[in-house]
Image: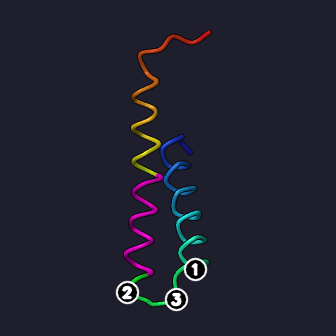
């Protein structure tokens, strides 16, 4: 698997875990799941692009 697929899988599993841990209502769960999933997946991609111009040691 490539890194992006693993990142999406990790974001999915973490979002499912926190959604079932903190939310009770079905509609509220879906909204919270998508917010957490997007924050984790898109946030990781954005941070990766921000680190791109910096050289490796």
Residue 7: percent from the left, percent from the top?
A: 53, 48
| Magenta stretch prevailing secondary structure | helix
Residue located beneath label 3 in the image: 24
Q: What stretch is highlighted in magenta?
A: 29-40
Quick one: quadrant of the C terminus?
top right
Q: Distance between the residues labelled 1 and 3?
A: 7 Å
Circles 3 and 2 in contact, beta carbons < 8 Å: no
Residue 4: percent from the left, percent from the top?
A: 48, 44
| Number of numbered markers | 3
Circles 1 and 2 in contact, beta carbons < 8 Å: no
Residue located beneath label 1 in the image: 20
> Image quadrant of residue 45?
top left
> Image quadrant of residue 10?
bottom right
Please, what secondary structure does the residue beneath circle 3 have?
loop
> Image quadrant of residue 30?
bottom left
Quick one: quadrant of the N terminus?
top right
| Dot placed on the residue nearer the N-terminal end, 1 or 2 | 1
Q: Residue sitting at 39 percent across and 29 percent down?
A: 49
Near mark 1 (Cα within 10 A), the count class, few <14, some 14-19 or many ≥20, is: some
Please, what secondary structure does the residue beneath circle 1 have?
helix
Q: How far apart are marks 1 and 2 (CA)?
A: 12 Å
Above or below: residue 19 compared with residue 8: below
């Amino acid at each position: 698997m490539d890194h992006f697929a693993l990142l999406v899988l990790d974001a999915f599993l973490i979002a499912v875990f926190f959604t079932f841990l903190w939310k009770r209502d079905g509609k509220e769960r879906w909204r919270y799941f998508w917010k957490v999933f997007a924050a984790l997946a898109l946030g990781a991609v954005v941070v990766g692009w921000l680190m791109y111009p910096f050289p490796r040691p």
